[in-house]
Image (spheres, rainbow, N blue to C red):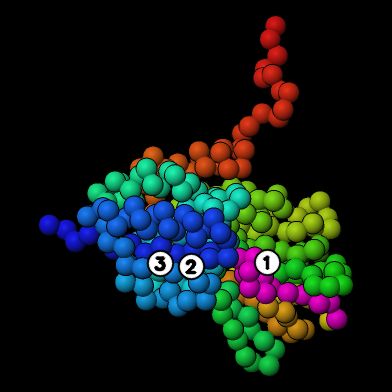
Amino acid sequence: MRNPLATVILGNGSKQEAIAVADRLAESLRHIDEIRLVGVDLASDSDLSALSADIALVLGGDGTVLHTARRMGEHPTPVLGVNVGRLGFLADETPDGVLERLHDLAARRYKIDDLMTLTCTIHHADGGARSYRGLNDVVLRAAPTFHLLEIGLSIDGESVMTYRGDGLILATPVGSTAHSLSAGGPILPPNAQMFVVTPLCAHTLTQRPLVDDADKVYEIVPEGAGVATVVVVDGQVQHPLKHGDRVTVSRGLTPFPMVRLPGHSFYRTLRDKLGWGAQPPGDRGARQG
């Protein structure tokens, strides 16, 4: 006989809706013998790197999932994202939907997608370095006063090109549907092992997004002195750069496990959450005759 599924509830405790959903889920879980609720933690700064749980129900929006992934570090617990935010691409299950599917969790009828992560290392000109773990993307962009940037890109030590514009995005497959997509980048399936490099407001018509292997090391360097720049990881961590600093991005050592309930479809999520493939309002389809 299998042990009950050890489950923890995490989330954004600053949202009253998340608190209410946590209470509802906790009450329901306590009545299911095949599931053991091991804790509820809605704090924003807890150490989540050593959770004693089989899965974590994360309540909030996509930002909450990204924040949770970073706090779990290199020892992540499989996460089922429950959307109490707005878009909910990573947190794509509704509270009512999860409550209705608790029997699937109890019977362990789910799969785990190991999502590619990234490691962003900032190498300072003075010899120091700082690394960050990310799930979505790394953005190098102008800081106030927002001058045009020149950014050199090298891949595996080979100089590729210099971008001129507002910045540059290096995104994972998961991040390809976030900031990169808004900037005109391609959609990558979540199981792809690739990076997409997307320029921000490129100052030429010849610069287009680039997709390349995740096993390579990508180096981006702001060129020219006196232009304030900043590195942003997953839209949440910001690190200012000084002249002579450089940034390397590579595949993370540990993937991030996401719980997928039966019937989950990446393409349906694109359609439902991002309106992918939807006809413009008033479009009546192909012309007849």
Residue stretch in magenta: 226-238
Does residue 236 show up magenta in the picture?
yes
Q: Residue at x 80, y 72 (%)?
A: 143
Q: Could you tell which of marks 1 and 2 lies nearer the N-terminus?
A: 2
Does residue 182 show up magenta in the picture?
no
User: Horizontal and vertical percent for residue 194?
Assistant: 53, 58
Three-letter code for the amino acid on which mark 1 is drawn: Val
Q: Residue at x 38, y 47 (%)?
A: 99
- The residues bearing labels 3 and 1 have C-alpha atoms spaced at a distance of 33 Å
Secondary structure under tag 1 reads strand
Three-letter code for the amino acid on which mark 2 is drawn: Leu
User: Horizontal and vertical percent for residue 170?
Assistant: 63, 63
Which residue is at the front of the view, 158 or 270?
A: 270
Find residue 40 and name its label: 3
> CB of mark 2 within 8 Å of CB of mark 3?
yes
Mark 2 nearby-residue class (10 Å; few <14, some 14–19, many ≥20): some
